[in-house]
Amino acid sequence: MQNSESSRRVSIKTAAKRLFFHFGLTKTSMEEIAQQCHLAKPTLYYYYPSKEAIFNEIVIDEAQNFIDKVEKKIPPHLPADEKIAFFFLTLYQDLKKYARALSHLPESLYENYPHGRPIVEKINEFVREKIRPLLKEGWKNRLLDFKDEESALAALVVMTDFLNLDWMRRINEKEGDKIIEHVIEIITNGIRRNTHE
């Protein structure tokens, strides 16, 4: 039963994602989603209370997969401070590619992406999960210096808040490259241990 419910949810999200990518969130209805995945509308409501709930789950799934892929690219031999810099640079570079790949999507999709603060917080939680071990490693190896791990972690996560599809679409790519370079420099210099101590 659990497996069939899970596969039904995947089927609903796949159908909804096609519609959202083609028409945008506002122009897609629950009825269209139900038709697309060959379900009765009441059955669709059993799984999701609204199209926004489906959209939000799709965004969370995409973000989790995206951030996992970024983490897997970090070379394990790098010291922690360089791993953090690599993580942010790779996150930016991969988001640039993602934004280009989605450039054909309707404007209305971007107006709703991500859909609400809880989604942004969930994405930030994924980033936090990836950065925390790097901070701990840097502290343990005396490469990084910060007064409070939670505050340092929160500051690093806040720095990723501006890296979103809307920002990527609004800014000139060369200007974005310069900005991210400075942001990474500020981040790593801010937590790197002073070697003259």
Image: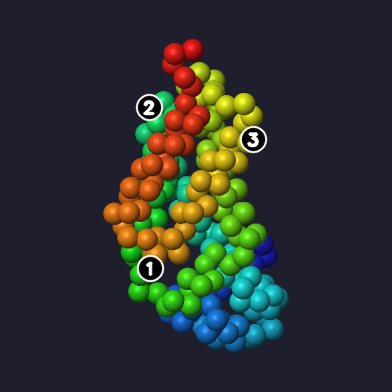
**Sequence order check: which comes first, mark 1 or mark 2?**
2
Residue type, numbered disc 1: Leu
Tell me the tag on residue 40.
Answer: none
Q: Is residue 186 above or below residue 9?
A: above
Q: Image point 37% across, 61% down: which residue?
A: 171
Asked if residue 104 shows in the view, the reply is: yes
The nearer-to-camera label among 3 and 1 is 3
Q: CA distance from mark 1 to mark 2?
A: 33 Å
Q: Which mark is residue 77?
A: 2
Q: Residue at x 57, y 70 (%)?
A: 55
Q: Which mark is residue 102?
A: 1
Left or right for 9, reference 182:
right
The image position of residue 106, as x and y in percent, is 42, 78
User: Which quarter of the rendered picture does the N terminus lie within?
Assistant: bottom right
Q: Amino acid at mark 3?
A: Glu
Residue count near mark 2 (Cα–Cα under 10 Å), binned few <14, some 14–19, many ≥20:
few
Q: CA distance from mark 2 to mark 3?
A: 25 Å
- Which of the 4 image quarters holds residue 97? bottom left
Percent of width and height locating residue 113:
52, 67
The mark found on residue 150 in the picture is 3
